[in-house]
Image (tube, helix red, strand yellow):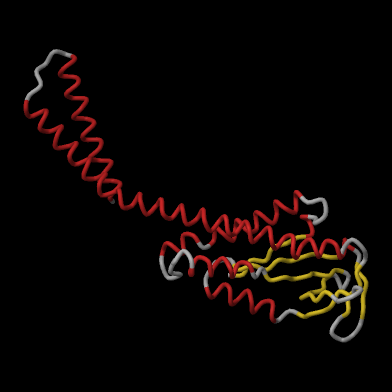
């Protein structure tokens, strides 16, 4: 509504200005009433703009907060990539032997493995809880290797021929904490809801970019599971 009023007032002021210019260019006299109408219209425009200043200021603040969260998110994504996905990639350079809960073992080649990254769809308590719960119900196994086994959450597909390694994106929880603790954003506000999905999208985008850029981790082995 405010935008409609502003547009109307601005249009009226512009019309008054052109009317004064037309009178001047055609040699017609410019009456005191013409100047009074134009002055009133310009005053209304100034009042309308003044009313918009707080909105513009808040909009700039929101952009600043989003930029800050985006920077933090990209840093967390880079750390996750090099501390988890690169490790998985190194393990998958050779065939892997997996030890299941029933103590049976099976060997998988690289092209038999998919890495599914589980991430909340929104940065709210419900989505994060659902993401955590989705991992808790997954089965666990160990990738056997010298020194120490690598524990994974997993699922099997294609009658056990395909191994799905599932990992919860815990850095997403850190993003939520940063927004609450350092930016002092309230999860129950419209401002939060307008920002909460964008950092998660940026996290996925950064991981995909690093996979495409990397000579090791193959983007076609990565899939995303977004939990509402």
Decide if residue 176 is on the left or right side of residue 136: left
Q: Residue furthest top?
A: 27
Decide if residue 41 is on the left or right side of residue 170: left
Residue 27 vs residue 190, the one in the foreground: 190
Residue 36 percent location from the top left of the image: 10, 32
Decide if residue 40 is on the left or right side of residue 120: left
Residue 1 percent location from the top left of the image: 28, 51
Residue located 25% across and 37% down the image = 10
Q: In which quarter of the image is residue 106?
A: bottom right
Q: Residue furthest bottom?
A: 102
Residue located 19% across and 21% down the image = 21
Residue 165 vs residue 87, the one in the foreground: 87
Q: How many marks?
A: 0
Residue 213 percent location from the top left of the image: 75, 48
Residue located 54% across and 75% down the image = 126
Q: Residue furthest left?
A: 32
Residue located 56% across and 59% down the image = 199
Q: From the image, which quarter does the C terminus lie in?
A: bottom right
Residue 71 percent location from the top left of the image: 57, 55
Decide if residue 39 is on the left or right side of residue 152: left
From this view, report whether residue 30 is shown above or below residue 118.
above
Q: In which quarter of the image is residue 20?
A: top left
């Amino acid at each position: 509504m405010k935008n409609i009023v502003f547009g109307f007032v601005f249009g009226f002021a512009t019309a008054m200005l052109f009317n004064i210019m037309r009178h001047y260019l055609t040699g017609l006299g410019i009456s005191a009433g013409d100047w009074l109408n134009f002055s009133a219209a310009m005053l209304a425009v100034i009042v309308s703009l003044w009313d918009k200043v707080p909105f513009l200021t808040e909009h700039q603040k929101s952009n600043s907060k989003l930029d800050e969260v985006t920077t933090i998110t990209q840093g967390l994504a880079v750390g996750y990539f090099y501390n988890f996905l690169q490790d998985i990639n190194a393990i998958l350079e050779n065939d892997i032997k997996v030890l299941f809960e029933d103590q049976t073992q099976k060997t998988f080649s690289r092209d038999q493995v998919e890495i599914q990254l589980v991430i909340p769809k929104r940065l709210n308590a419900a989505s994060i809880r659902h993401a955590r719960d989705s991992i808790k119900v997954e089965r666990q196994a160990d990738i056997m290797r010298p020194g120490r086994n690598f524990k994974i959450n997993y699922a099997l597909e294609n009658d056990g021929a395909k191994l799905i390694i599932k990992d919860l994106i815990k850095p997403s929880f850190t993003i939520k904490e940063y927004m609450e603790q350092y930016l002092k954003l309230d999860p129950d506000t419209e401002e939060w809801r307008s920002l909460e999905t964008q950092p998660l999208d940026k996290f996925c985008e950064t991981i995909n970019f690093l996979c495409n850029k990397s000579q090791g981790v193959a983007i076609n082995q990565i899939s995303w599971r977004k939990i509402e």
